[in-house]
Amino acid sequence: MDVKLINLKGGCLCGAIRYQVNAKPFDADYCHCRQCQLSSGAVVMSWMDFKAEQLVWLKGQTKEFSSSDKVRRGFCQDCGCSLSYRHIDYPDYVTLSIASLDEPNQVSPNYHIYTVNQVSWLNIDDNCKRYKLARSETN
C-alpha cells in the first residue's frame, strides 16, 4: 500500500475521543486472535497501521489496558469503544481500529492473522493472504 497524504478522521462511539491521521496506513489487517475478540466483543477486528507521529488526538485520549506484557490496547473510558493497539517494542508505530473511522470504507485490510482462532461460522470471501498466527511467526 502506497503511503499517500489523505485526511482520515475517527473516534469512539460516544464522541469523547476524536483523532485525525494525515496519511494512508502503511498496512492493514483482519485479526482473529482471542485477545482482539475478547477486548472488542467481536469475532474479528480490522486494524490499520501508522507511524505514531502521523496520529493527532483532536479530543480526549484513550485509556490503555495492558493485555499482555508488551501490548497496550486503547479504549474510551466512557463508552468502552476499542480504538488502538500499541506494542511497546515498537514505539514509533500505532494501530487504530478501521471501524472507528468516520468513513471506514476508506481503508481495507490486506491480510488475515491468527486465523487459527477464526470462528467456524464466519466465512470471509476475499483474496487476502491468511496466516494461522502472526505474519512474523512460522505458519
Image (cartoon, grey):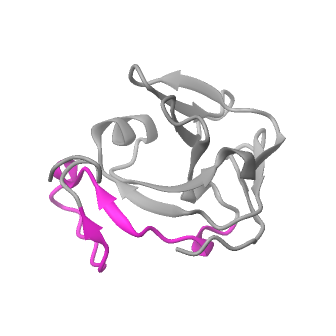
Q: Position of residue 114 (x, y in %)?
A: 25, 50
> x%, y% of residue 2?
58, 75
Instruction: Please tell me whether residue 9 is drawn above or below residue 67 in the rendered image.
Output: below
Percent from the top left, x then y, of residue 133?
22, 48
Residue 34, placed above or below residue 70? below
* Residue 70: image location, x then y, percent: 43, 25
Q: Is residue 123 magenta?
A: yes
Nearest the viewer among 38 and 6 is 6
Give the side of residue 54 with respect to residue 24, left or right: right
92 part of magenta stretch: no
Identity of the residue drawn at 64% across and 35% down = 79
The magenta stretch spans which residues?
103-130
Which quadrant of the structure image shows residue 20? bottom right
| Residue nearest the observer in this picture, 14 or 55 | 55
x 78%, y 67%: residue: 7
Q: Main secondary structure of the magenta part?
A: loop
